[in-house]
Image (cartoon, rainbow, N blue to C red):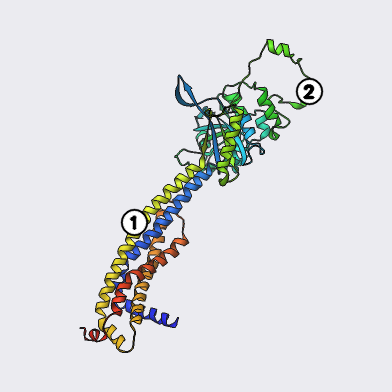
Amino acid sequence: MRYLIRTIGMALKALTRNPMRTILTTLGVIMGVAAVIAIREIGQGASKSMQDTIASMGSNILLVLPGASQAAGVSTGAGVVTLTPDDGLAINDPDRCPSILNVAPVVRIRPPLIYNNKNWQPWQTYGTPPEFLVLRNWSSMTEGFSFGDQDVASQTQVCLLGQTVVKQLFNKIGPGDDISDYESPVGKEIRMNNKPFKVLGVLSPKGANTLGSDQDDIVLAPWTTVKFKLAGQSAQVTQTASASLSSDPTYQGQTLSNLYPGAGTAALYNSPSASETADMPQPVRFVNVDQLLVQVRSQEQIESAKKEITDVLRERHHLRPGQPEDFQLRDMTEMNKTVSSTGDLMSLLLLVVAGIALLVGGVFVMAIMLVSVTERTREIGLRMAVGARPRDILVQFLVEAAVMCVLGGMIGIILGRLSSITVWYFMHWPVAMSLETIFAAVGVSAAVGLIFGFYPAWKASRLDPIDALRYE
C-alpha cells in the first residue's frame, strides 16, 4: 500500500511538470466522460417523464373495446354494439377473473358545455363510475369531491371538470394561468345538451399524454346519466341489466328499475301471465357501453388477465370455437414497453458516440505517453542504474496514465453534471442524476488509462539501462 501511494505521488509530480500538456492529453477523456454523464442523465430524465405520463393514464390497465363491424363483407373498422355493463360485472367477478382488480364501464360523448355567456366543447366527456378515478390514478381533487355510487344508481346530473375546461368556462379573476386565478366552479351549474349539471369538483392536473392530447380537457359524469340522459337512449333497460346492477354490491338499495326503494313495495299493475307475454312481446332495449377499463392486479398477471377476459366474454357473447371475437383487447403496457425501448435505444446510440470519444481520448493518451517515455529515457536509465526493476518502471508509467485519465474523468463528471443542469434550467428538459453512471465513468476512465498506457509503460520497462543513460 505504501509503495502504491508513493508511486501515485511520483505520478502526480510528473504530471504537474507540464500541466498544459496534461490537460490537453486528458481532453478527449474529459469530453467523453462529460458526454456520457450528460446523455445518461437527460436520457433517464426523459424516460422517467414518459413513464410518469403513461402511469398517469393508469397502471396495469387493459382496454376492452367493441369489435369491428362489417357491411357487405367489408370491415368498416367501426365498433359494433357488443359490450354491456353486465360484461363488466362478469369480468369483475373474482371467481371467474382472479387477476382483475377493478372494472369501470365508460360511455363517451362530446356535447358542448355552456356556462353563462361562455361555451366549450371538451376533447372528451366520459360517463363513468367512481372507480374510474382509481383506475386512472386520479383520486386526488384540486377542489371539491367526486360523485359516488348513489349518483350512478339514481342518474344524478352532476359532473367533475378538468383543469382546461375550468380555464375555458370560468371567468379569470387574477393574473397568470394558474387554476387558482379562476372562479371556483364547485357548486356552479353548467349545461350539457341543454341539461343542467352541478359541478362537484375539479380534477387534479395531468398534462398531455404520450400522443400529445390534453388529458385535462375532460368532463366526468355518472355513466348512467350520460347514457340515458345525454346519449339519447331511454332509461328503459333490459331485465338482465337491471338484475345484474341490483346484484352488484355498489348498487345495493337503489337500481335503475327501483329508484325509490323506500316508497313501498306494492305493484301498481298486475304482472302479465306467460300467455300474455307470448301473445304481446315487449321491445327490449340493449344497454351498451363504449369501452371497459380493466385494472389488473400486477404487471406479471397481464397475460393471464387477457385470457380470463377473453374466456368470459366469449362465453357471455355465445361465440363458438373458431368464431372470431366481437371485442378487442388493448394492452396499455405495450405502449410503455415501446416508449421505454425507444428511449433505451436512443440512449444506447448516444452512449456509443460517447464511447467513440473515449476511444479517441485513449489513443491520444497513448500517443502522449509514448512521447513522455522518449523524453524521459535518461531518467528511466538512472532509475534502473540505482536498482529499479523493469516491473517498477512499468507500474510507474501505468499509474501515471491511470491517474491522468481518472483526473480527466472527474473533470468530465463535473462538466457533464453542469451540462445536464444547464439543459434542465434553460430548456426545461427533465433530467435524473445517475450515481451508477458516475461511478462507472470513474472506472472507465481508469480502465482507459491502464489499457492505452500499457504499451508505453511496457516499452519504458524494456529499455536497456546503458542505452538509456547514453540517450541525449
Residue 244, how many percent across, how many down?
Answer: 68, 29
398 versus 155 height, above or below: below
Is residue 170 something that shows in the picture? no
For the C terminus, give its image quadrant: bottom left
Which residue in the structure is indicated by mark 1?
Answer: 353
Residue at (58%, 28%) from the top-left corner? 83
Residue at (70%, 13%) from the top-left corner? 277
Residue 30, how many percent across, how many down?
Answer: 35, 65
Which residue in the structure is indicated by mark 2?
Answer: 265
Q: Which sits in the foreground, 250 or 381?
A: 381
* Quarter where residue 130 is shown: top right
Q: Amino acid at mark 2?
A: Thr
User: In the displayed structure, does residue 422 sit left or right of residue 88?
Assistant: left
* Quarter where residue 453 is shown: bottom left
Is residue 40 something that shows in the picture? yes
Which residue is at the far front?
A: 321
What is the distance, in whole Å, between disc 2 and disc 1 at their CAs?
78 Å
Label 1 secondary element? helix
Q: Which sits in the foreground, 259 or 175?
A: 259
Residue at (31%, 76%) from the top-left corner? 458
Residue 21, how many percent across, how many down?
Answer: 28, 72
User: In the displayed structure, does residue 378 sit left or right of residue 241?
Assistant: left
